[in-house]
Amino acid sequence: MKHRESGPSQRQLRVGEQIRHSIVQTLQRGKFNDELLFEVAPLVTVAEVRTTPDLKQATAYIMPLGLDNAEEIVDALNEAAYYFQKQINQSSNLKFTPRVRFKIDDTFDEAAKIDTILQNIPKYAEDSEEEE
């Protein structure tokens, strides 16, 4: 028996994408009891959904575009997670509906930090050459 790579399986990726589409459609409909979600739903981007290998849990990484209250939005989404799970159940053919939780996607912030560091490398190299 050969060893699997450490990344997600094809099934995890496919189910994650199905869940992402279902969450996006639910956000676009905008039928929420929470006033905050009703207002910001069009401004929330679902970047990725990762599932556990047993497909029982799913983590949706979101980016609230141009909004400063990201933590409040994530809290509101997590409180409405049952509503999203119900929509996922109706739109998918999974045996079990995964438990959904939301987190902020900070990959763009991390990429910006790395980009800034990489742009400053020549500056540091020039400074160290001048000191010698």
Image (cartoon, rainbow, N blue to C red):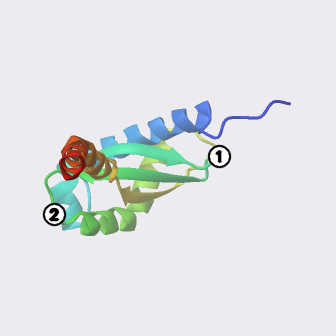
Q: Residue furthest front?
A: 132
**Residue placed under numbered mark 1 in the picture:** 53
* Disc 2: which residue: 68
Image x and y of residue 122, in percent: 22, 41
SS type, badge 2: loop
Q: Is residue 100 left or right of residue 128?
A: right
Q: In the rendered image, which quarter contains the N terminus?
A: top right
Q: Residue 81, image x and y in percent?
A: 41, 60
> For the point 60% across and 39% down, which residue is it?
7
Callout 1: helix, strand or loop? loop
Residue 91 in view (yes/no) = no
Tell which of 78 and 69 is nearer to you. Answer: 69
**How far apart are the alpha carbons under marks 2 and 1?**
33 Å
Please provide percent x and percent y for residue 45.
27, 45
Q: Eyeballing the image, is 49 above or below 59?
A: above
Using the image as rendered, state which of residue 20 and residue 35 is in the foreground: 20
| Type of amino acid at the residue the image marks with label 1 | Pro
| Residue 98 or residue 113, whichever sits in front | 113
User: As shown in the figure, which amino acid type bears the numbered disc 2?
Assistant: Asp
Q: Residue at x 20, y 53 (%)?
A: 131
Please say whether residue 25 is visible from this viewpoint: yes
Counting from the top left corner in percent of width and height, residue 19 is at 45, 42
Few, some or many residues within 10 Å of mark 1 (<14, 14–19, 20+):
few
Label 2 neighbour load within 10 Å: few <14, some 14-19, many 20+: few
